[in-house]
Image (cartoon, rainbow, N blue to C red):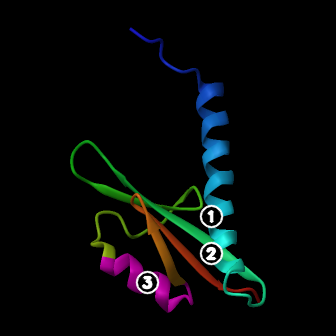
Amino acid sequence: MAAQPTLEQLVIALGREIRKQRTILERICAAQGRREWEYLLVHIHEQRDGWYEYHANGRKLEGLDNKAIYVVLDALGSEGWELVGVVRGDFYFKRPKG
């Protein structure tokens, strides 16, 4: 049986994943050849009891617990975020800086 990863190993793996996700966003937006963009990665975290939490760039989105994804998408759209892709349940957004 394999040993459980240490906290340090988990943090290192998380850092790698964040860098990989940022690279994906940069490639998506670079292909569009426009001005500078802000990027947002939204991940849905399902709790054991079926409760959903949404995290954007690693921070919990307050007030959206257990809401349907279309409610979350609408809330982000009203803040100027544009959905540019979905990969394995991760939602990628962009909006112009400034």
Which quarter of the figure is the C terminus placed in?
bottom right
Whether pointer 2 and pointer 1 mark residues with C-beta atoms closer than 8 Å, the reply is yes
Q: Is disc 2 surrounded by few (<14), some (14 to 19) or many (20+) residues within 10 Å?
A: some
Residue marked by disc 3: 75
Q: Residue at x 38, y 58 (%)?
A: 53
- Mark 1: secondary structure: helix
Looking at the image, is 52 positioned above or below residue 5? below
Residue sitting farthest toward the front: 31
Mark 1 crowdedness (10 Å alpha carbons): few <14, some 14-19, many ≥20: some
N-term mark: 3 or 1: 1
Q: CA distance from mark 2 to mark 1?
A: 6 Å
- Quadrant of the image containing the N terminus: top left
Q: Quadrant of residue 41?
A: bottom right
For the stretch drawn in magenta, what is the main secondary structure?
A: helix
Vertical placement of residue 23 versus 93, above or below: above
**What is the number of the mark on residue 24?**
1
Mark 2 residue element: helix
Q: Which picture quadrant has residue 30?
A: bottom right
Residue 44 is one of the magenta-drawn residues: no
Q: Residues within 10 Å of mark 3 (few under 14, many from 20)?
A: few
> Residue 83 appears at what percent x and percent y?
49, 81
Name the mark nearer the viewer: 3 or 2.
2
Q: Are marks 3 and 2 in contact (CB under 8 Å)?
A: no
Up the image or down, 73 lies above or below 64; here it is below
| Kind of residue sitting beneath label 3 | Ala
**Residue beneath disc 2:** 28
Up/down of 97 relative to 61, above or below:
below
For the point 66% across and 61% down, the residue is 22
The range drawn in magenta is 70-81
